[in-house]
Image (cartoon, rainbow, N blue to C red):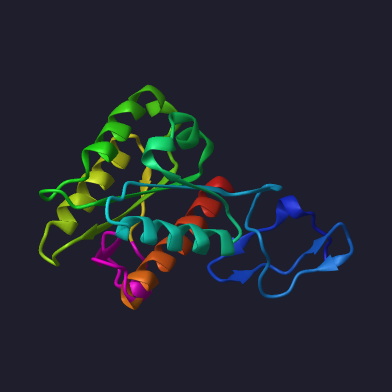
Amino acid sequence: MRQRTAKQLQRFDDTLVPCQIDSAVRLKNHIQPYFRGDQMVSVLVVYYSRTGNTKAMAEIIAEAAGKEGAQVRLKEVADASNDDLVWADGILIGSPVYFGQPASEIKRFIDDSISVRKQLENKVGAAFVSSGHRAGGRETTIMALLQSFIVHGMVVCGDPISTGGHYGAVASGTPDDRSSQECRGLAKKVVALATKLQST
């Protein structure tokens, strides 16, 4: 087999191309972390939470992204900055549903990101939300977040077909097993997509 370096590592879906690193180590099936050249893909998870439900979703997403090999920053929106947005290859923003829209704290964070707009192009963006009622406006809130990503020229990512295949991860109140599965699936998809985009 022709010898290859780590920089030549490629990932196609869930199967790694067989190769060798430094002419010594043969890779099998899966490897952590995902590589962007010789660097890890970086993922930012930003959230606002008043009751703790959106925070719980954010923690599930951050943990899942880390298990996929990404370098993760998990931040409450008050502690997040434009520097975090520029740093990340994949950005996931979470908010509770307020009158069918994101919380004002999240909206303010997005408004302030205009100063780094040109630096966010082609990054991966995804959203997750929680509401007190199943018809409380979850889809409209997710769409508002996704629209913001589109304005930045980002690549929008929904949850994978395996967990529903819709706009993002949602929860009614405390995240249940289904919501947690959506969060993990969304995190995995963001990491995989960001990896593929950064390798091109």
Q: Quadrant of the N terminus?
A: bottom right
Q: Which quarter of the figure has residue 110?
A: top left
Say which of 93 and 52 sits in front.
52
Prevailing secondary structure class for the magenta stretch in the rendered image? loop
Q: Is residue 85 above or below residue 35?
A: above
Indicate the quadrant where residue 59 lies: bottom left
Using the rendered image of the protein, determine whether residue 101 is visible from the camera's viewpoint.
yes
Residue 63 position in % (x across, y down): 51, 61
- Where residue 174 appears, x then y in whole percent? 29, 67
Quadrant for residue 51, please give it: bottom left
Q: Which residues are magenta?
A: 159-176
Q: Is residue 147 magenta?
A: no
Q: Position of residue 34 (x, y in %)?
A: 62, 57
- Residue 200 seen by the camera: no
| Residue sitting at the far top | 115
Residue 179 screen position, x and y as percent: 32, 70
Q: Is residue 119 above or below residue 2?
A: above
Q: Residue at x 17, y 62 (%)?
A: 132
Q: Is residue 132 left or right of residue 197?
A: left
The extreme right residue here reads: 24
Q: Nearer the viewer, residue 11 or 43?
A: 43
Residue at 37 percent of width and 70 percent of height: 180
Which residue shows up at 27% across the image and 50% down it? 50
Q: In this image, 136 relative to 36: left or right?
A: left
Callout count: 0
Left or right of 186? Residue 174 is left
